[in-house]
Image (spheres, rainbow, N blue to C red):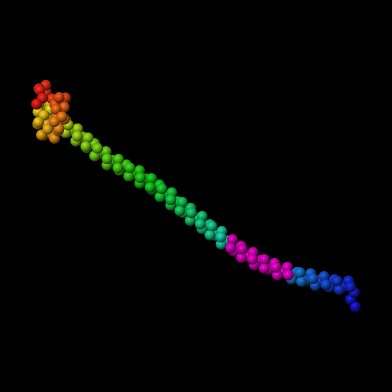
Amino acid sequence: MLNFFQIAVIAVGIAIVVVLLVLVRAYSKLRLEYRALANSLNASNNDIAGLCSAALTVNSRLTSSEEMLRELSAALAQIQHQNQNPVDQQQAESSDTSYRAVIQNARSGASINELMHNCGLSRDEAALLIRLHGSAEPLQ
């Protein structure tokens, strides 16, 4: 018969085999879960890399759009400035020319009524111009 020591060794051996089987099964299950998590992590990393690339593209487009907007704004301001200046100059020259003609008429001896009628001035304007630029004759 088997003695107590041999039975204990056999029992311990069977227990070790059972524990090893349980550990192998747990290891296999953990390995499958690890692979699933690793695949999920790789997919997430790929998604993040794609998002970063898209963000860089959007940033580049925004930068170029801002530059174009600044250039267009500057060009528009320059065009507006160019369009306003000739008109202002022409109006100033036209106004200057018309006043010169009125002053010349006043120097030539035109009367208040003639300046009012021919140049479209009010009585006071015509009187002032004759007083400033007219001959020394008395006012009418």
Judged left or right of residue 29, residue 60 is: left
Q: Residue at x 16, y 27 (%)?
A: 128
Q: Residue at x 48, y 54 (%)?
A: 55
Residue that extends furthest to the bottom in the rendered view of this protein: 1
Corner quadrant of residue 17: bottom right
Corner quadrant of residue 6: bottom right
Secondary structure of the magenta portion, mostly?
Answer: helix
Magenta residues (range): 22-41
Q: Residue at x 11, y 29 (%)?
A: 112
Residue 25's spot in the image, x, y percent? 70, 70
Q: Residue at x 89, y 76 (%)?
A: 2
- Residue 137 vs 25, above or below: the answer is above
- Residue 53 vs 107, above or below: the answer is below
The C terminus lies in which quarter of the figure? top left
Residue 24's spot in the image, x, y percent? 72, 69
Judged left or right of residue 110, residue 41 is: right
Would residue 15 be counted in the magenta stretch? Answer: no
The N terminus lies in which quarter of the figure? bottom right
Residue 39's spot in the image, x, y percent? 59, 64
Judged left or right of residue 14, residue 96 is: left
Residue 85's spot in the image, x, y percent? 27, 38
- Observer-nearest of 19 and 58: 19
Residue 103: tell me if it is visible: no
